[in-house]
Image (cartoon, rainbow, N blue to C red):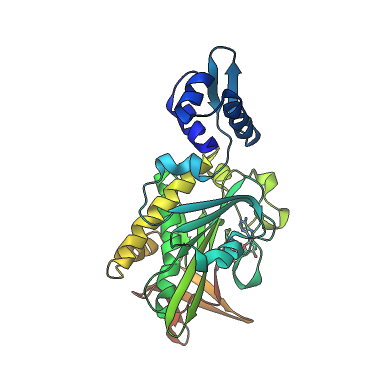
Amino acid sequence: MKHKILDRLHEVDGFLSGEKLSEEFGLSRTAIWKHVKALKADGYQIESVTRKGYRLVASPDIVNYDEIKEILHTKIVGSRVIYFNSLESTNKTAKEIAAVNNEGTVVVAEQQTKGRGRLGREWISPNRKGLYFSVILKPDTDPTKVAKLTLLGAAAVNRGLLDMGIQSQIKWPNDIVIKGKKVAGILTEMNCELGTINHIIIGIGINVNQSNEEIPYELRDSATSLLIESNRAINRKDLFAAVLNRLDEFYLDFIDGEDMDRVLEICREESAVIGKDVIVIQGSNSRKGHVVGINNDGELQVRFSTGLETVYSGEVSIRKEDEYI
Ligand code: BT5
């Protein structure tokens, strides 16, 4: 009910009387007042004036469904948005609930206490400073396509940022960088059996409004935020919706004949590594190479001194020769 009351408060410019609300919803005025109180506890600033009623003054900086539904234009992604104040990891929770939720379900949290990167690494996720969410997808395809699907997330974040007026680049396969520093990371995890994908989880972490001091000291050479790079606070709700809208658009292409042309085009054109000298790190083995391109399966093609090789996204890190990441 509080969501419905909130919708009505959003709709009107000025005050909405308690009497009108209680008539509309068939509730007592005390019940209405209790819901308003609950909304206030959620962080909504609601003015209440005797004989005038209630007026929404400001919404909190939170990224739940209520706050993005007006700007979400998706068919699949975001069909359900499950919101948490704090989680260990949105990927972990998404995995736990994937079997009993439809594809398109998004798990989002304002902070993560054990945010995960690839290969057991950590993703620092301070409260309300960034966006941390995971999307459950159930594509009817085989596990060999996962390299391509990994790129969906990268293309969606890069385009979502562009929709917000921010230019960034994709560092294959899962980093989004601005001026060589990482601003977002993507962790794609797959659950499959007997040659079919049960589900994949695309986990996205974006550094949004951290100041330089709020970036951990040891990461300051390699990490940045949108606030630092654009010199303005970024509306997390708009960005969240922009990335989900793009992800939906690209995923619809994928399920319609596995068309990844646009995603591949974006990953190539907006690449931070194509044409660059890099260090390819696989386990304890590092080799220098030159990135030639991304093939149609979404894999990186690198020329080493020993010849041209295809590099798979699973267990590899790419570092530009002249940069920290
Ligand atoms: C990634 O791993 O870049 C994937 C990060 C995915 C995070 C999202 S948040 C929502 C969802 N739920 C999760 O639990 N995870 C996903 P990787 O390429 O392994 O990069 C990790 C490395 O980046 C760390 O070892 C640090 O060096 C660095 N790092 C950690 N936190 C960072 C941050 N906030 N910004 C930039 N770099 C960071």
**Is residue 83 visible to us here?**
yes
Q: Position of residue 293 (x, y in %)?
A: 38, 72
Q: Position of residue 275 (x, y in %)?
A: 41, 68
Q: Residue at x 43, y 52 (%)?
A: 244
63 is higher (above) or lower (below) than 37: below
Q: Residue at x 55, y 63 (%)?
A: 94
89 horizontally vs 178: left or right: right
Q: Quadrant of residue 156?
A: bottom left
120 horizontally vs 2: left or right: right
**Is residue 302 visible to us here?**
no
Q: Position of residue 254 (x, y in %)?
A: 33, 66
- Assign the C terminus to one quadrant of the image: bottom right
Depth check: 295 or 322 in front? Answer: 295
128 horizontally vs 216: left or right: left
Depth check: 132 or 223 in front? Answer: 132
39 is higher (above) or lower (below) than 279: above
Q: Which image quarter has ligand 1?
A: bottom right
11 is higher (above) or lower (below) than 186: above
Q: Please, which residue is most extreme toward the right here?
A: 217
Q: Quadrant of residue 53?
A: top right
Q: How many marks?
A: 0
285 horizontally vs 6: left or right: right
Depth check: 297 or 80 in front? Answer: 80
Q: Please, which residue is most extreme toward the top here?
A: 51
217 is higher (above) or lower (below) than 22: below
Q: Please, which residue is most extreme toward the left here?
A: 257
Q: Residue at x 32, y 67 (%)?
A: 255
